[in-house]
Amino acid sequence: MTKNDSLSDGEKLARVLLHYGLIESVESNRMKIMCPFHGDKNPSMSVNFDEGFFYCFGCGEHGDAEKFVKKIEKQERGLNDLAALKVYGTILKGAVDGTKLVRNIPSEVTRSSQRLLYDQAYDTYHGLKKVSWMSSEEPEVVNAREYMERRGFTPDTLSAAGAKVTYRKNYQLIFPMRDNGIFKGWVCRTMIKEIEERRKYLYNKGFSRATTLVGDYGPSKFKNIKGKYVIVVEGYMDRLKFIQCGIDNVVAILGWKMSSQQIQKLKDEGIDVVVSALDNDEPGRKGTKFLSEHFTTIRWCYLKGLKDPGDMDQSTCDKMYKRTKQKLREAFKKGC
């Protein structure tokens, strides 16, 4: 058995990602990273070190460590598969620190680490002073308020969301991530164009997208329709725009594809009808198709030319909601 043969699939993938500078260390058996195969602005590639497998929710690229090297070497250097395999072999032979996976760490240690990260996130957000978005003249607040107003958000909406300023240079806006009212972490939004092109959002370390539904989906939130449903959106700002338009039974899944844990959370609340307001593009349509495999799914009635909920104003939202509610009524009449 060669040295390379003794490596697990997960260790091979870890060595590859470390080699290309996509991770600094292996922090857990599953991680989210920036995808190098498309213009990724937020981490959309899921890496599973238990299985040695990667999958990008943005562009659909997937496979093992060997396929990763072939793809990236062809994309960046124009190498064919044979030449890429030589690079792959060199990577696996190299002495790389940090590839030891955490699967052998006792579960109580892992839980303790997660609790520490949660406490740090809680203290970071709640340690910031509350902002008076309507009246504050602090330069950082004024800058953030004007930026959000250009994006179509009002000071009242920022107050309702619990938005604060971090006084960081690159990520000044911070929002709490609450799952049915329970604090799960925070997300920061950059207001700098050059930074935005690389990464719009910064999540606290330890935040789990897969296990979090950002928003409200409890029974008390369902209005106007005789039946339980929830509107599903991709991003935090999409949900914020719905809230501003007066619609509160909305959850953000922080991606285009709902995880199995997120699906179960809705089912545990007795929800089997969802309105997919995922973006009006190809990933959004794929995500809607996936939702339909698990729920009775109604597509949000986008008006022509609107790509996502962030493009809505009160008037266009009202028009789309009216059309969508008619579809919902029809679905509930059928006994969904």
Image (cartoon, rainbow, N blue to C red):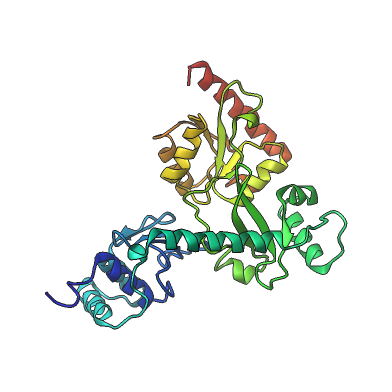
* Residue 130 drawn at (x, y percent): 78, 57
- Residue 295: where, in percent of width, then height? 44, 32
Picture coordinates of residue 88, whole percent (x, y):
25, 75
Q: Across the whole image, how many numbered discs are drawn on residues?
A: 0
Above-or-below relation of 29 to 279: below
At 60% from the left edge and 26% from the top edge, which residue is drawn?
Answer: 325
Q: Quadrant of residue 109?
A: bottom left
- In front here: 171 or 196? 171
Most extreme residue toward the left, as rendered?
1
Considering every residue shown, the one lying at the far bottom of the view is: 95
Residue 185 visible in the displayed image: yes
Q: Quadrant of residue 306?
A: top right
Question: Residue at coordinates 42% horizontally, 34% vertically from top-left?
Answer: 292
Vertical comparison of 72 with 319: above or below: below
- 274 left or right, relative to 319: left
Q: Quadrant of the N terminus?
A: bottom left
Q: Nearer the viewer, residue 271 or 302?
A: 271
Percent position (x, y) of residue 285? 46, 42
Q: Residue at x 46, y 50 (%)?
A: 210
Left or right of residue 143, residue 34 in this image: left
Task: Confirm whether residue 43 shows in the render.
Answer: no
